[in-house]
Amino acid sequence: MEAVVTYLTFNYFISTMLQLFGSSFGVNFKQAAGGESGLKLIAGIKTLDTGIIGAIFISAIVVYLHNRYFEKKLPDFLGIFQGSSYVVVLGFFAMLPIALLTCYIWPKIQFGISSLQAILATSGVVGVWIYTFLERILIPTGLHHFVYTPFVFGPAVVEGGITQYWFAHLNEFSRSTQPLKTLFPEGGFALHGNSKVFGAPGIALVFYFTARPENRKKVLSMLIPVTLTAVLSGITEPLEFTFLFLSPPLFAVHAVLAATLAATLYTFGVVGDMGGGLIDLLTRNWIPVFSNHAGTVLIHIVIGLCFTFIWFVVFKFLIVKFNIMTPGRDIDKEADIKLYSKQDYKDKKAGKSDEKAAPANRYREQAAIYLEAVGGRDNIEKVNNCATRLRLTVKDPALVEDDAAFRAGGAHGVVRNGNALQVIVGLDVP
């Protein structure tokens, strides 16, 4: 919640700065959010579209502030501002210079991406390769939509975007006997979905065959749903982020292969609207054009399956050569047959730190005293607090100790009313 509040504060500051001084930063704030404006609505706030990079950056700052200041003891008269409130206050002031720097730097990054789009649109096969590579490699940052949106849904190569143009002229293309590439050469910039259909099975097969034999059933049960999702619907994140986490270089190789597949298909005359999975390929491309372009469809399938094999060979070589611990390869039969979490990483880095006693903390000590005094955790039915008091509902009032036990933890007194209990702590109560 600290991160959410601080992130919204960050975007409010950007919105106000751009509204007042947008022209100084090279931003036309009067434009509607979306499209090529570089603006976005976040929780109703019109702000710069910083993608997931902005969210992660602000979250990292909040985590730092939380770890450093959450338990800081303030004077008693400021006790109400301790904990999360203190973190948010500090975040508020930190967001002012950060928002200003974002307004100054981020539009230049967006301009660079837009300029690159214009170059790609006129670069033929090379442009298709670079476009597809960027669309894949930028997925972890969330900036890939800056690459594909102007092509697929915007006017980068055709008015209205490739998707709209393809549907509007699909009947015309399907009836014509001219090569599809001649009819619609711009369709080379919507071939990025092929890596989902043909790349995902190759990657999944590698994960299965490089796993230890005793782990393969578990690996298979994990891979089947994510691979089917990737192939059929084009949602690749569960599969791609698995090896992105385990080995970022593998993801870079994946992006290179995806770009090479798209460029190869384009060279052999394959074009269309292929940003999704197999369902999109069938319904939007293969079935409608098959009557007069069966040869192109068959070439498409053959090249795609060849690249499935290429993905398998390349990934298997790299995984074995560099001993990359993909799911099921570790000697430990359980530890690696899953997606790794941040806590797993922290525990691994900490080593034996969990064996060391936690440093003394005033609030933990107080909490332990109060917890024991109310009869332990099993005696607590509900717990809440107001500005100065812990408010509890206990199951058995007879288990609650006398006021002296609470005063030993620093409480000023106790108010009892049947099962309802109020421990007067003071402004430190959060």
Image (cartoon, rainbow, N blue to C red):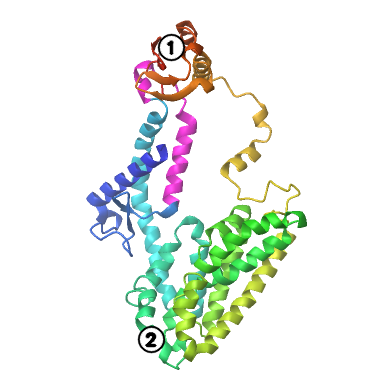
Give 177 or 77, whichever is nearer the viewer.
177
- Taking the magenta stretch, the answer to whether it contains residue 83 is no
Query: How far separated are the C-alphas under marks 2 and 1?
Result: 79 Å
The front one of 297 and 155 is 297
Residue 246 shows up from this direction: yes
Q: Is residue 62 on the magenta stretch?
A: yes
Residue 397 versus residue 33 in the image, above or below: above
Give, as a three-letter code, the residue at label 1: Ala
In what quadrant of the picture does the N terminus appear?
top left
| Disc assigned to residue 171 | 2
Point out the frontmost of discs 2 and 1. Answer: 2
Q: Nearer the viewer, residue 343 or 220?
A: 220
> Which element type, helix, strand or loop, lies under badge 2?
helix
From the top left corner, tell me how far across and down residue 196 is, in percent.
54, 68
Q: Position of residue 159 (x, y in %)?
A: 32, 76
Residue 97, how many percent across, how many down? 35, 42
Mark 1: secondary structure: loop
How many numbered discs sit on the rendered protein? 2
Of residues 355 and 301, the one drawn nearer to the viewer in this rendering: 301
Q: Earlier in the sequence, mark 2 or mark 1?
A: 2
The residue that label 1 is drawn on is 411
Q: In this view, does 26 lie above or below 395?
A: below
Q: What residue is rendered at 53% in x and 22% in y? A: 378
| Whether residue 272 can be seen here | no
- Specify the segment rendered in magenta: 53-81
Magenta span: helix, strand or loop, mainly?
helix
- Residue at left offset 37%, top offset 79%: 167
Is residue 377 positioned above or below 174 on the image?
above
Q: Residues within 10 Å of mark 1 (few under 14, many from 20)?
A: many
